[in-house]
Image: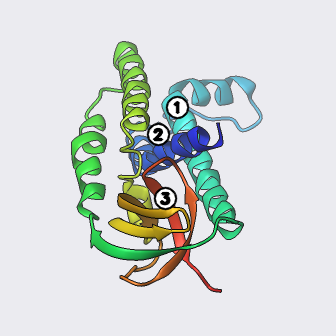
């Protein structure tokens, strides 16, 4: 269950840029007289900014998910493995952004049905990304300085080929890395300090 939670967190984190766009597009400031002490003024502001508020909450959750990943990686207990072969696949960040995130900002947020369709589309897209293990193609992590690699590794239990590594730094052949296993072929790694 922990790996599924990490995959969901990575998917939500991948949408952080989209949430920022939603906030910019949907924020509606009061045009009428706004009274700070009036419940009705605040209620109208909340009603006019439902998508903005939800996007702010999800953006906050994205920040939490990122911090949790960093914390989890610091506490890895698995025996580090050595990288035998490696290639950068950072272009997959851009593929996700261009294919899925950018088209979603064209929805009309003033039409209730389109907001419902957008929500359902994000849920279905998340399920597909998690089930097909494409959740690592994460533009938010790219903005935070992470890289994606396809690699072969020498583990204690034997060699594994064609694994995907997500790492903040640059990786190279012969380097040993500590890791969190997200699934059978995707690992969140950091340089082994020992």
Q: Nearer the viewer, residue 72 or 187?
A: 187
Q: Where residue 77 sits: x, y (%)? A: 70, 66
Q: Residues within 10 Å of mark 3 (few under 14, many from 20)?
A: many
Q: Quadrant of residue 135?
A: top left
The numbered mark, 2 or 3, whose residue comes first in the sequence reads 2
Residue count near mark 2 (Cα–Cα under 10 Å), binned few <14, some 14–19, many ≥20: some
Quarter the N terminus occupies = top right
Q: CA distance from mark 1 to mark 2?
A: 6 Å
Mark pair 2, 3: CA separation? 37 Å
Asked if residue 61 can be seen in this view, the reply is: yes
Give whichever of 119, 124 is nearer the camera: 124
**Tag shown at residue 187:** 3
Foreground label between 2 and 3: 3
Label 1 secondary element: loop
In the picture, measured across the screen, residue 48 lies left or right of residue 41, that is: left
Identify residue for label 1. 49
Q: Residue at x 36, y 36 (%)?
A: 132
Colour scheme of this structure image?
A: rainbow
- Residue 15 higher or lower than 162, as above or below: above
Please report whichever mark, 1 or 3, sits nearer to the chain's N-terminal start. 1
User: Looking at the image, is 89 positioned above or below residue 29?
Assistant: below
Bin the neighbour count of mark 1 within 10 Å (Cα to Cα): few under 14, some 14-19, many 20 and up.
Answer: some
Judge from the rendering whether residue 178 lies leftward or rightward of residue 42; answer left or right.
left
Q: Position of residue 63 (x, y in %)?
A: 59, 55
Secondary structure type for disc 2: loop
* Circles 1 and 2 in contact, beta carbons < 8 Å: yes
Residue picked out by circle 2 = 27
Looking at this view, name the residue that lies furthest to the top.
113
Up the image or down, 107 lies above or below 93; here it is: above
């Amino acid at each position: 269950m922990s790996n599924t939670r990490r995959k969901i967190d990575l998917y939500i984190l991948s949408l952080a840029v989209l949430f920022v766009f939603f906030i910019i597009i949907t924020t509606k400031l009061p045009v009428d007289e706004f009274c700070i002490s009036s419940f009705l003024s605040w209620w109208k502001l909340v009603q006019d900014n439902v998508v903005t508020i939800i996007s702010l909450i999800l953006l906050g959750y994205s920040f939490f998910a990122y911090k949790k990943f960093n914390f989890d990686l610091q506490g890895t207990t698995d025996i580090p493995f050595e990288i035998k072969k490696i290639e950068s696949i950072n272009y997959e960040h851009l593929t996700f952004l261009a294919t899925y995130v950018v088209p979603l900002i064209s929805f009309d947020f003033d039409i209730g049905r389109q907001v419902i369709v957008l929500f359902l589309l994000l849920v279905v897209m998340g399920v597909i990304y998690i089930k097909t293990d494409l959740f690592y193609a994460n533009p938010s992590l790219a903005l935070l300085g992470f890289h994606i690699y396809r690699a072969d590794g020498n583990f204690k239990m034997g060699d594994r080929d064609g694994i995907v590594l997500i790492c903040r730094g640059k990786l190279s052949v012969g380097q040993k890395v500590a890791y969190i296993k997200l699934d059978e072929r995707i690992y969140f790694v950091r340089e082994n300090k020992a």
